Image (cartoon, rainbow, N blue to C red):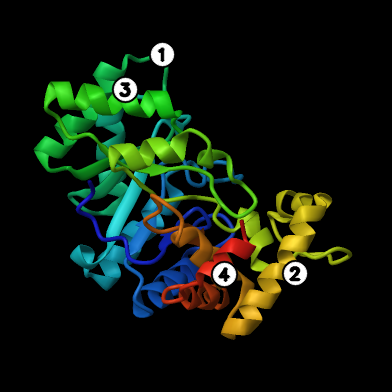
Amino acid sequence: MTSLDFGPLVLGGNTFGWTSDVKESFAVLDAFVEAGGRSIDTADVYSAWVPGNSGGDSEAIIGQWLAERGGRDDVVIATKVCAFESRPGLSAANIRAAVDESLTRLQTDYIDLYYAHRDDDTITQDEYVAAFGALVAEGKVREVGASNFAADRLRSAVDIAARSAVAPFTIAQDKYSLVERDIEGSLQPTLIELGIVELPYSSLASGFLTGKYRPGVSVDSARAGSAGAYLEQPQNVELLDTLDDIAAAHGTSVTAVSLAWLRQQDAVGAPIASARTVEQVAPLVESFELVLTAEELARLV
């Protein structure tokens, strides 16, 4: 079980250094925290895909913000290792080198939650479970998590940690939303059984679940292609109508309803969602205290 308090929503840091420059990133972080948010998710690979970036860009921006604003102990910072081309995989040596580099970029001496960004079957699970456990024992990391793991691999990692008496994975991070439901198969029941908390990413399906993507509407966004693809499925267009109805009943946004639905699913602690601009923070904040009725949840099954 996790001892971390993520609040009702985790702010995704993937936009920092990508679609949000330093000034805008600071403004987004300020607005989120001022509204009561207290968890920020990033990764060492964010945003290495942008021309001119070298990776670690999001972490560096968050580190600058922490150094200027203070209040490190008031926020939960999560980052990841494995997917960064300069620090690939889950070998013990790579994990140790990567965490030190992340700590430097984040300008902090501890990371609240450190994830395996994905599984690595080229390394024995015993090796990386021990490596993550050592970081917790040393105080560099408070808890460890697993992102994009299959249910059987997550279970075996937890079993190894128990046998080795080291800190186990307490958090999972996987793609999950109203239009991406794959984890409901084998992974979600496994999370419930193991007492692992899910913090879903892509909670708004690349922006589709904000409601701004509609048939015949052109949206200027770096994610327009992936988000617009959901409109090719008729059930998703019908879903938007249902979301519109529920949002109107609560006097809130489609974004808030989509996030509230996710937060109320089994094993989910808080959804992860990002904001490119300060204006996009407001609908995220609207979701903080929104609770859908049983009838509304049933309409969204």
Please name the amino acid that badge 3 sits on. Answer: Ser
Q: Looking at the image, is mark 1 or mark 3 nearer the viewer? A: 3
Dot 2 falls on a residue whose secondary structure is: helix
Instruction: Identify the residue at image location x=49%, y=41%.
Output: 54
Q: CA distance from mark 3 to mark 4?
A: 38 Å
Dot 3 falls on a residue whose secondary structure is: helix
Q: Is residue 96 visible?
A: yes
Q: CA distance from mark 4 to mark 2?
A: 16 Å
Residue 84 x/y as whole percent: 45, 33
Q: Are marks 1 and 4 in contact (CB under 8 Å)?
A: no
Horizontal side, residue 190 vs residue 110: left or right: right
Q: Looking at the image, is mark 1 or mark 2 nearer the viewer? A: 2
From the viewer's side, name the closer residue of 124 and 56.
124
Quickly name the residue at label 3.
Answer: 156
Quickly name the residue at label 2.
Answer: 241
Residue 64 x/y as whole percent: 33, 61
Quickly name the residue at label 1.
Answer: 122
Q: Are marks 4 and 2 in contact (CB under 8 Å)?
A: no
Q: CA distance from mark 1 to mark 4?
A: 46 Å
